[in-house]
Image: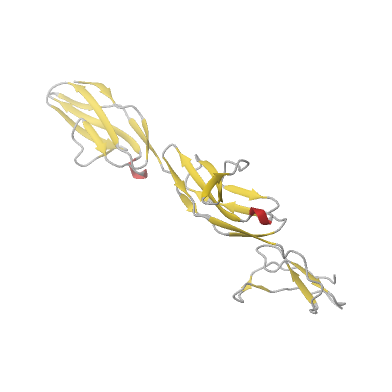
């Protein structure tokens, strides 16, 4: 007996069907499919199929064959690769930026082989952003009030498509200190998402070594030690 034909190496998309076939010239042929050199229970026909593949399906397949007096015959290897459909691991979140500063939208996906189409909502329609890069980050370098709105990204690869959550961009103009305040200390921007500046309107006799910054719930935000001198 001889193997006359067999399936080639194949690359499949997740959740599609796999069908491997071997043809043998001989009589009283018996088959035993293997994956990574281990027998597959119940896989004893000329065709081995899986209705919906996933990552666990990937591997190297072969068939051990007996036919009449022929024993020890094995097909060639058939390597199966399974590519995932695109999916978000980290989705979009709402973004707040001060006018003239950077606004950044970031996602994380399950595979690098992806196309990104960033969109902004205009009225009821989603419109492609023409200058948006084809990657997982979209940045507005100097955000303005007219940039406010809803943003999203659509990711695609050869195996599918997925759409992110919507992200609302808010742009605030309170990015300069209010020197008219009667307070000795001025902290700005307030509120902020990243950096702050601290000004003192009085004469200090010594430097301050530690500054505690709290969030809106009053919880102290961990920060590095720094030195603050009179403004």
Nearest the eye: 78 or 160: 160
Nearest the eye: 218 or 19: 218
> Is residue 59 shown left or right of residue 207?
left
Question: In the picture, residue 194 is in which quadrant?
Answer: bottom right
Q: Where is residue 107 in the image (x, y as percent from the top left)?
A: 54, 51
Question: In the picture, residue 66 is in which quadrant?
Answer: top left
Nearest the eye: 69 or 88: 88
For the point 33% across and 27% down, which residue is it? 8
Q: Position of residue 125 (x, y in %)?
A: 52, 48
Location of residue 15 with respect to 72 vertically, above or below = below
Q: Position of residue 183 (x, y in %)?
A: 79, 79
Q: Which colour scheme is used?
A: secondary structure
Q: Residue extending furthest front?
A: 123
Q: How many labels does the image show?
A: 0
Q: Position of residue 94 (x, y in %)?
A: 57, 59
**The C terminus, quarter of image:** bottom right
Nearest the eye: 85 or 224: 85
For the point 32% across and 29% down, which residue is it? 77
Location of residue 7 with respect to 98 vertically, above or below = above
For the point 59% across and 52% down, which residue is it? 105
Location of residue 14 with respect to 166 vertically, above or below = above
> Is residue 25 shown left or right of residue 95?
left
**The N terminus, quarter of image:** top left
């Amino acid at each position: 007996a001889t193997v006359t034909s067999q399936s080639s190496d194949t690359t499949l998309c997740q959740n599609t069907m796999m069908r491997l076939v071997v043809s043998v010239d001989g009589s009283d042929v018996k088959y035993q499919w293997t994956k990574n050199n281990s027998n597959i229970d119940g896989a004893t026909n000329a065709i081995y199929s899986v209705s919906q593949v996933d990552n666990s399906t990937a591997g190297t397949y072969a068939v051990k064959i007996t036919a009449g007096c022929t024993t020890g015959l094995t097909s060639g290897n058939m390597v199966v690769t399974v590519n995932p459909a695109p999916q978000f691991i980290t989705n979009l979140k709402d973004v707040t930026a001060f006018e003239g500063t950077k606004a950044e939208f970031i996602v994380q996906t399950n595979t690098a082989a992806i196309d990104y189409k960033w969109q902004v909502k205009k009225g009821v329609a989603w419109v492609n952003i023409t200058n948006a890069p084809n990657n997982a980050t979209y940045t507005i370098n100097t955000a303005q009030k007219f940039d406010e709105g809803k943003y999203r990204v659509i990711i695609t690869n050869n195996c599918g498509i997925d759409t992110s959550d919507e992200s609302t961009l808010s742009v605030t103009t309170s990015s300069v200190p209010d020197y008219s305040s009667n307070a000795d200390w001025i902290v700005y921007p307030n509120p902020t998402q990243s950096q702050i500046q601290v000004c003192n309107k009085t004469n200090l006799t010594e430097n301050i070594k530690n500054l505690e910054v709290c969030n809106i719930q009053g919880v102290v935000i961990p920060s590095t030690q720094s030195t603050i001198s009179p403004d």
